[in-house]
Image (spheres, rainbow, N blue to C red):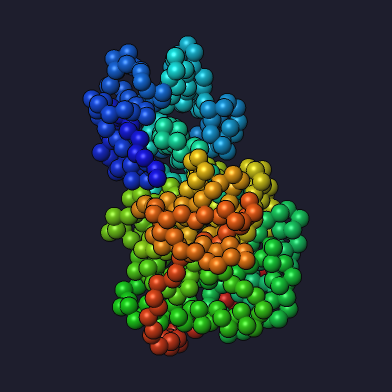
Amino acid sequence: MTEKYVIQVGTDIGAQSHLFCALQSLLPIHFADLSSPAVCAGRILGDEDGSEKKHGLLPLHLQLSLPQLSSTASAEALLQTKVRFANEADVPFPFKGRTMTVKLPRNLTPLAVKSGETVLLEGERGALWTVARQSEVKIYRSSMIWPGKTLPEAMNGDVFVAILPLLHFLREASGQNNIQRPPLRAPFIFDDPNLHWPRYGYVNYRDMATRAARENYHVTFATIPLDAWFTHQATAEIFRNNTQRLSLCVHGNDHAKRELAGRYNDSERVALLRQALHRIEKLERDSGLEVSRVMVPPHGACSENMLAEMPARGFEAACISAGSLVAHNSDKMWTAALGYLPSEIIRGCPVMPRWAMTGCAAENALMAAYLGQAMVLRGHHDDLRSGVELLDELARFVNGIGAVQWMNLEQLSRTSFEWRVEGRTCWLRPYARRIDFRMPDNVENLRIEPGLHVASSEWHVLAKNAPPENIRAGLDSFWPASYPNPFGLEICQKPPAATEAPLRRTPVKAVVRRALTEVRDRLRLN
C-alpha cells in the first residue's frame, strides 16, 4: 500500500490554499511546515523563506523554490506567450524539446540563472524553470505558480505549464514517476451524428473512414438515442466495415437542454436512462453494430445523481470535461480536485475527460499524455466546415507524441488504470468499473490498491480457462502461479442493484426539436 511522503512547505507558499489541499488529496503526500521533525521527501521554499543555507539541505534529496502565491497575478491577468522546453533529462515526457503557446501571468519575473543551473523551460523574457545539483540534492527553481483558485482551473493545456514544475516535483518526491500508466490513447469525438444517411452535415462517414485508416486515427460519434427510430443500412455497413476507425457511443437521450442535469426523482432518472438504452439496443439490432456503453451528456450537462445511477443501468463510464462537471455540480466538494486523474470516480461512475479539438488542442493533448489521461478531442460537424484536414493535422500531432493506440470509448475506459511492482507483488489501481490488464513478468500475485479514487473495494478477476476469483482492495491477493506469464486478465466489479421504472414517454416537443435540428445540420454541406 502507498505510504504518505512528507513535503515541507514554506510559510509564504500557501499550503492551505485550495490548490495545495487538492494535490494533497490526490497524491500520496502530506504537507508540513518547515519545523516538522518528520523525515521529509522534499521541501518547497518561497521568496520569504530564505535560501537553502538557512534551512539546510540534508537529509533532503529534492527542493523546489516557487514565487509567493499571493504575489502572482490573478487568473484573468494572463498574457499569451511562447515557451520552449529544453532537451534535458529532467524535462518530463512529453514536453522535452517542445515549443508551446501558453498563457502566463503578465507580471511574471524570469529567473536569474545561477552558476551550475540548467534551464529546463525558457520564455520570451528569460528562464522560467531551472534545476541544479548540490551534493546529493536536486534543487529546482520556478518563477511560476498557478494564480487561479482551484486545481480544475489549472488543468487546461494553455495554462498547465504554470503548475507543471510543482506537479513534477511532487511526483518525483513521492515516487509517482515510477508508476506505470496506461499507454498513449486517443479518439476524436463528434457529438450528434446518426445513421440516417452516409453524411451528417460536414461529416462524410466513408471519406472519414478512408482518411482515418491513412492517417491512423479513430472517430467516435456520440449518437442521440432518440435518433434510433431509423437506420440506413448502407450507412451502417460503412461502420461495420471500419470498426477500427469508426464507432458509436451514447449522447444523452432526447438531446434536451440539461436533460442529464435536471432535478429528477430516483424513478425519473431510472426511466430516462432505461429509455436511452432501450433505444440504443434497437439501434444495435438494426445496424449490427456494438455501441459503447459510455455516456456523453449533451452540452456536458450531467448531475452527480445521474452519474450515480449510470453503473446500475449498464454504463461503463461517462465522458465529460472537468469544466462542465464543475459548472453543473458547483456545490459539490469533489469538484475542487478534478482534472488530474486518468479518470474521475464520481459516485461510483468513472468519468473520462475531454477537450475541444479547436483552440489549444495540441497543448491539451500534451497535458493529457503527461497525466496518463486519454487524449480525447471533441467537436461538432461544423468544426469540419473547412474540411476533414483538421482531423488529419491533429492526428499527425497526436501520433507524433508517441506510439498512440486509437480506440473507441469503451476500450478507452477499460485501459484506465495505474500499476506498480513491489518485489513480487503487482499493485493495481483501477479507474474504471472494468479493466483489461496484462500481468507483467516475474510477478507472483496481484493486489488492488485501496483508496478514495479507486472505483470499488470488491473485484472479480477472470483469466482465460480459469474460474473467476473475488478479491477485496487492499486485503486479498490474486495468485496467478498456475498461469503462463504474462497473461491477460479481465478485472471488473459487480454493477449495483438496478431498480425498475416504466419507460418514459417521449415529449412531442423533443421529437420536433430534434427533427428541426437535424434538418438544419444536414443542410450545412461542404
Query: Measured along the vertical axis of the image, is residue 143 above or below residue 492?
Result: above
Quadrant of the frame with the N terminus: top left
Query: Measured along the vertical axis of the image, is residue 508 above or below residue 393?
Result: below
* Left or right of 152, for residue 182: right
Query: Measured along the vertical axis of the image, is residue 249 above or below residue 377?
Result: below
Quadrant of the frame with the C terminus: bottom right
Give the percent coordinates (x, y) of residue 320. Answer: 46, 60
Q: Residue furthest front?
A: 482
* Left or right of 226, for residue 457: left
Q: Is residue 192 visible?
A: no
**In this orientation, which residue lies closer to the viewer: 43 or 231?**
43
**In this orientation, which residue lies closer to the viewer: 84 or 408?**
408
Give the percent coordinates (x, y) of residue 13. Answer: 29, 31
* Left or right of 405, for residue 277: left
* Residue located at (67% from left, 56% from top): 217
* Residue located at (45% from left, 22% from top): 138
Q: Residue furthest top?
A: 115
Give the percent coordinates (x, y) of residue 281. Answer: 56, 81
**In this orientation, which residue lies closer to the viewer: 162 or 242?**
242
* Residue located at (42% from left, 51% from top): 449
Q: Is residue 251 visible?
A: yes
